[in-house]
Amino acid sequence: MRRHQLAQMLIIGAIASAGGIAVALAIDWFPKVGSTQARDVDTLFDVLLIVSVPIFVLVQSIVLFCVWKFRMRPGEELKDGPPIHGNTMLEVIWTTIPALLLVGLCAYAYVVLGDIEEREPNTMVVNVTGEQFAWTFQYPGENGGKPVRSDQLYLPANRPVEFKVRSKDVIHDFWVPEFRMKIDAVPGITTEYRITTTGDVRNYPVVCAELCGLGHATMRQTAHVLAPSEFETWMARKRKEAETTT
């Protein structure tokens, strides 16, 4: 009888887990991919879903099955359940398996983190400054020339970019959701992260992901990813403007 009940619980849990994984993977959790790092992050998220959904669904299925199967029936109000002694082997198993899962997932996440933070050749540096309630962007000057400043972010397609992020006042958080990367802008220090834009020529929102004051919701600008030739044209025009500005 006990084996039959255990088989019932496991079958119900397995069916529910398969359905839960299918539903979780079918949901479009993130916006469009805007960087090569985004694909690695999305894959990591899918792996976490595949591992965590069955655990959650299986546990809930067993709990609900036990609530239904072993519920109190009329006439059993004063009955006491049979004395049950702990099962050492079962406790070892349900402690060891989660521990191994956590170690494996943490190791995989560490590898992904190392891959997405790796510096690539021909990386363009963009200095990002946050203040209440706007972002400004600065590109290093060419051959010792004046730096280029902009209140909008312009990037070439298919190009590694390193953002050096600072703040003039309070803590902000520089975030382009399509890049899947974000980092705090902290007064007094410089934080940084790297992405490589994809070949898509499009615009992405730049937002602040840290509550920074009454105007936090308005701290939004646009990241314009241009074709390399268009970006060079824009940069040449901005450099000329910078040289002629006193």
Image (tube, rainbow, N blue to C red):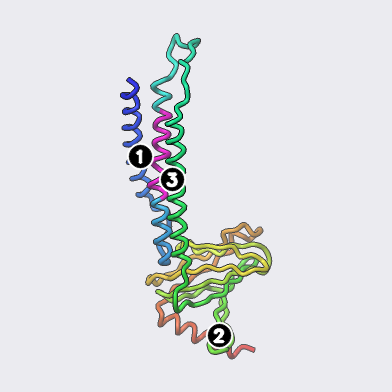
Q: Where is residue 235 in the image (x, y as percent from the top left)?
A: 49, 83
Residue 119 placement (x, y as % from top left): 47, 72
Viewport quadrant of the C terminus:
bottom right
Secondary structure mainly formed by the magenta segment: helix
**10 Å crowding of disc 1: few (<14), some (14-19), many (20+):** many
In the rendered view, would you say 234 is above or below 32?
A: below
Q: In which quarter of the image is residue 63?
A: top left
Q: What residue type is labelled 2?
A: Gly
The disc labelled 1 sits on which kind of residue? Ser
- Name the mark nearer the viewer: 2 or 3: 3
Look at 41% across and 40% down and name the residue there. Answer: 55
- Which mark, by number, is residue 100? 3
Q: Where is 245 relative to 206, above or below?
A: below
Q: Name the residue under label 2.
A: 141
Q: Which of 230 and 111 is in front in this view?
A: 111
Q: Are marks 2 and 3 in contact (CB under 8 Å)?
A: no
Instruction: Between residue 203 and residue 46, name the one nearer to us.
Output: 46
Q: Position of residue 83 (x, y in %)?
A: 47, 17
Q: How far apart are marks 2 and 3 (CA)?
A: 51 Å
Mark toward the start of the polypeptide (2 vs 3): 3
Q: Measuring 46% from the left and 68% from the top, which residue is drawn there? A: 118
Q: Relative to 195, does residue 121 appear above or below in the rendering?
A: below
Element on which disc 2 rests: loop
Q: Does the magenta stretch include residue 55?
A: yes
Q: Which of 202 and 175 is in front in this view?
A: 175
